[in-house]
Structure formats: C-alpha cells, structure tokens
C-alpha cells in the first residue's frame, strides 16, 4: 500500500525591528513543534523627496567672469538612507546654448559661455 506523508506548518511572525522567536507546529496528534530565533530588518525605500536647503538662491555674476567660473552652489538633501539619498542636479533648460551649467554631483553652478550685459 502506498501512502504519502504531508507536514503542515503554521508560522506567525510579528514585524518589529528586533529579534523574534518563531514557532512552527505540524497538524499531527500530538502536534510536533520547533522554534527558531529570527531577526527581521526593514530595508529603506526611496520614499522621501530631495529638498533644497534654501527656498531661493541668488548669485551675482560680474560681466568679466571667465567661462568655467563657479557662480555659486545649490544644495539639496534627501532623508532616505543610502543609496536612496543620493542627490543629483541638472538645469531644467539644460542645453548647449545655456549661459550656465551645473555639476550634477555637487550642485556648483558655473558659467558656460561669456556673459555680457548687452
């Protein structure tokens, strides 16, 4: 006579940022149990937006400033954990004809071409 044996486990885990003891129990009579200690960690997700540290940035540029001169720096922070907290910068009107460029890593705004008042 052929027969199969099935084992069923009922596991209950409560999510916390600590260690837990988990009990597994089969459906037999009497029930057999086993336990193990489990550490549960919750990974950070990209759920926070980058926020500029100033509401408005204002920089002055002398007309004789050379191409490549740094005009100023903008800074934004993201409260997510790494790697989701990396901040990158770009100009919205980012084209080769723009008078300014921005370093995507550090937010330094630089002169991209000679600036005149005319």
Image: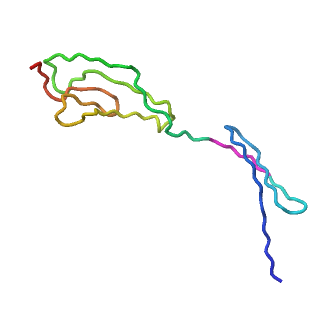
Q: Position of residue 51 (x, y in %)?
A: 42, 27
The stretch drawn in magenta includes residue 61: no
Name the residue rendered at 79%, 74% in the picture. 4
The stretch drawn in magenta includes residue 40: yes
Q: Position of residue 75 (x, y in %)?
A: 37, 25
| Magenta-drawn stretch, dominant element (helix, strand or loop) | strand
Q: Quadrant of residue 28?
A: bottom right
- Screen quadrant of the N terminus: bottom right
Name the residue rendered at 50%, 33% in the picture. 80
Q: Quadrant of residue 118?
A: top left
Query: Residue 103 versus residue 91: which sits nearer the camera?
Result: 91
Is 115 situated left or right of 93 in this image?
left
**Residue most toward the left?**
118
Query: Quick check: 26 above or below 59?
Result: below
Colour approach in the figure: rainbow
Q: Quadrant of residue 25?
A: bottom right
**Residue most toward the bottom?**
1
Is 13 situated left or right of 81 in this image?
right
Name the residue rendered at 49%, 36% in the picture. 82
Name the residue rendered at 19%, 31% in the picture. 98
Is 28 situated left or right of 103 in this image?
right
What is the tally of numbered marks visible in this picture? 0
**Residue most toward the right?**
30
Query: Residue 49 versus residue 83: which sits nearer the camera?
Result: 49
Please report the bounds of the magenta region as a residue range. Answer: 35-41
Query: Quick check: 14 above or below 106?
Result: below
Q: Position of residue 27 (x, y in %)?
A: 83, 61
Q: Position of residue 79 (x, y in %)?
A: 49, 30
């Amino acid at each position: 006579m052929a027969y199969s044996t099935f084992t069923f486990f009922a596991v209950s885990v409560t999510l916390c940022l600590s260690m837990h003891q988990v009990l597994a129990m089969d459906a037999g009579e009497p029930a057999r149990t086993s336990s193990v200690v489990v550490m549960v960690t919750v990974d950070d997700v990209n759920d926070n937006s980058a926020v500029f540290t100033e509401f408005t940035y204002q920089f002055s540029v002398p007309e004789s400033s050379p191409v490549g001169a740094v005009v100023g720096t903008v800074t934004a922070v993201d409260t997510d954990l790494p790697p989701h907290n990396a901040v990158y910068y770009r100009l919205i009107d980012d084209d080769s004809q723009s008078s300014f460029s921005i370093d995507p890593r550090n937010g330094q705004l630089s002169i991209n071409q000679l600036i005149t008042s005319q």
